[in-house]
Amino acid sequence: MLGCGRWGSFHLWYASRLGMPATGWEPGDSAAMDKLDSARRNAYVELPDEVLLTRDLQTALDADLLMVSVPSQEWRSLARELARHDLSRVDLVLCMKGLETGTGARLSSVALEEGIRVRSVSAVLGPGHPQELAAGVPTCMLVTSGTDEGARRVAGLLSSDLIRFYRSSDMAGCEIGAAAKNVVGIAAGVLDGLAFSGLKGALMARAPQEVARVVSAAGGDWRSVYGLSHLGDYEATLFSRLSRNRAFGESIVTGAPFQGLAEGVATSEALEQLAAGLGVEVPITSAVRDVLRGESGPREAIERLFGRPSREEFEGLPEGGRPCL
C-alpha cells in the first residue's frame, strides 16, 4: 500500500482482515507515518502487528498487488518513480478519486503516460467511510479495469462479507464520475451551510447529468455515472457528517474550521478544464469554482444557476453505451 493516510491505512487493515500479508509505505518525511508506526493506530483503524510499515520503496514494491492512495495531485511524481521499476507481475490498483489539474487527466491515464509496466491497472471506487467499515458496516464498491481479467482478479482478491465488489470495464466513465462526486459534495456542503438542504434533491438529479455529458464526450459510458462510482457514492459524500468535501463546502459558508484534504477543490479545477476541452458546459462545477476562487458568493452562485434558461430535463444525454461487466 503506497500511502498510509485515510484510505491507505484502511486497506492495510482490510488486507490483514482478509489474511493477506500487507506492507504500507510512506516517504521518510511523513509525520503521519511516524505516528502510525509508533502507535499502530490513527483516527480510522488500528493496525495488527503483522502489518509491516516501511519508508523503503523497494521493500514495498515486493508485492503481487500494489495499491496506491496518495493525493491525486501527487500521483504523477510517484508514478514517474514507479516507472523505473519492473512491475510486470503486479496488479496496480488506484484507491484515490481525482483528476489531474493542468491536464484534466484521469489517474489511470497518468500511470500509462508515465510508462508504468504492470500486469493490469485498476481502480477501486464507490461509497464508504473507513471509520464505518472498520466498525463492521458493510458496503458495495466497484473495481474498474482496462481488462476483464484484471477486474476479476482484483475483485476476487478483495471481496468479502464486508465489501461486495462489482466490476466495470468503463474506466473513463467510472474515474471521471468518482472524481466529480467530490465536487458535488462541496456543492452539497454549501447548501447545508446556507440552510438550503432541501435543494439537495435537485442537486442529486442535475449533477449526474452534468457529469454524464462529460463522460460521454470523453468516450466513456454515461450510464456509469448512475452506478456505484458516482451516484452510488452520493449518500456518503452529500449527506454524511464524515464527508470531508461536504464539510469543506459547509465551512465556506459558516466559517467553521476545516482540517484535512478536500479532493474536490483541485478536482473542480481539473473537471472544468476537462469539460472545456471537450466543449461541454458544466454549470454546477463552474458555480463551485466561482465560489472557491472568490469570484462569487455562495448565494449569488445559486441565484445564477436558477437564472439559467429552462431546458428539457435529459437534454444532451446520448442513448446506448457499453454494459458493465
Image (cartoon, helix red, strand yellow):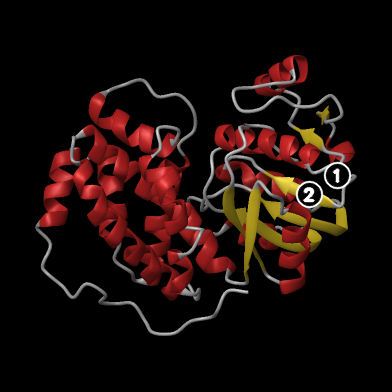
Label disc, if present, on residue 61 of the rendered structure? 1
Note whether residue 98 is visible.
Answer: yes
Amino acid type shown at disc 2 = Leu
Name the kind of residue labelled 1 in the image: Leu
- What numbered label is drawn on residue 66? 2
User: In the drawing, does residue 8 fall left or right of residue 211?
Assistant: right
Task: Judge by depth and name the residue closer to the eye, 40 or 140.
Answer: 140
Q: CA distance from mark 2 to mark 1?
A: 7 Å
Compare marks 2 and 1 and give the one earlier in the sequence: 1
Q: Residues within 10 Å of mark 2 (few under 14, many from 20)?
A: some
Query: Circle 1: is it few (<14), some (14-19), or many (20+) Cα within 10 Å?
Result: many
Q: Residue at x 20, y 45 (%)?
A: 198
In the rendered image, which quarter is residue 281 located in? bottom left
Q: Quadrant of residue 262?
A: top left
Horizontal and vertical percent position of residue 109: 62, 62
Q: Residue sitting at 18 percent across and 35 percent down?
A: 195
In this rendered view, identify the residue nearer to me: 242 or 80.
242
Q: Quadrant of the C terminus?
A: bottom right
Q: Are marks 2 and 1 in contact (CB under 8 Å)?
A: yes
Above/below status of 44 relative to 223:
above
